Amino acid sequence: MRFSRKIYMAKIVAKRIRIEAMTVKTILCGLVLSAAAFAQAANPLVDGSKSIYSGTKGNILKSADKISDDLWSWRPTPDVRSFGELFAHIADGQYEFCGPVAEGKIVDKGIEKTKKSKAEVVAALKEGFAYCDAAYGKITAANAAEGLPFFNGKPMARISIMDFNAAHNMEHYGNLVTYMRLNKIVPPSSAK
């Protein structure tokens, strides 16, 4: 009886060792995969900033799609920008904010002053967003905090300039949301 009990106990111990070895292998495999995933997200700071910017870009472009040609010149009061002027202003902002990162200087395209039709402004808006997309491609973990001359020549970190652009986009998306609501249009961020 004692001999069979020892064999039984040895089998239980061996089974536990195999289970623990499998657990250790699973944990190690998970750590390796996690490290690989983290390595692929080479720049979480820039990736996070670009994600916020991309959200603003998507909402603004979807908003432009929702505004009909007959509402393009609509404005809530005579003292504020029309729909079209707001979109043109946002397009200009893409060059003004992303210019220091893309070209080392603020770029003035004058879109708000020169583009009036929906087709012209939406094309300029898409080009402006493509310009900022390319600027994000120039930011690395090593240079994200590097100061560049910005408004009034004051230095600002590359990533902060890009975040300022996203904030500017959101500021004017807020204007667009109000305009849309006044015209009984559901904003993209509220649409289901």
Image (cartoon, rainbow, N blue to C red):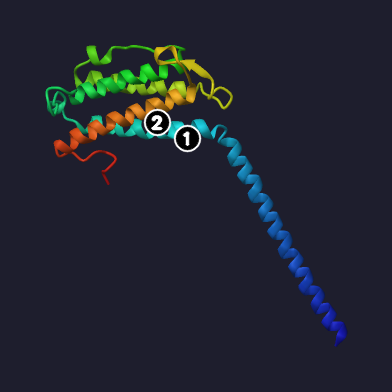
Measured in 3D between alpha carbons, the distance from the residue under mark 2 to the one under mark 1, in whole angstroms, is: 9 Å
Residue 119 in the image: x percent, y percent? Answer: 22, 21
What amino acid is at disc 2?
Tyr
Mark 2 neighbour density, 10 Å: few (under 14) some (14–19) many (20 or more): many
Residue 17 placement, left or right of 70: right
The N terminus is located in which quarter? bottom right
Residue displayed at 16% across by 25% down = 72
Mark 2 element type: helix
Residue 92 x %, y %: 31, 18
**Residue at point 40% right, 12% down?**
152
Residue 48, numbered circle: 1
Q: Residue 128 carries which label?
A: none
Q: Position of residue 21 (x, y in %)?
A: 74, 60
Tell me which corner region of the image, top left, top right, bottom left or bottom right, holds residue 172. top left
Q: What residue did someone put label 2 on?
A: 53
Residue 42 position within the rendered picture, expressed as x and y whole percent measured from the top left: 57, 33
CB of mark 2 within 8 Å of CB of mark 1?
no
34, above or below 118, in the image: below
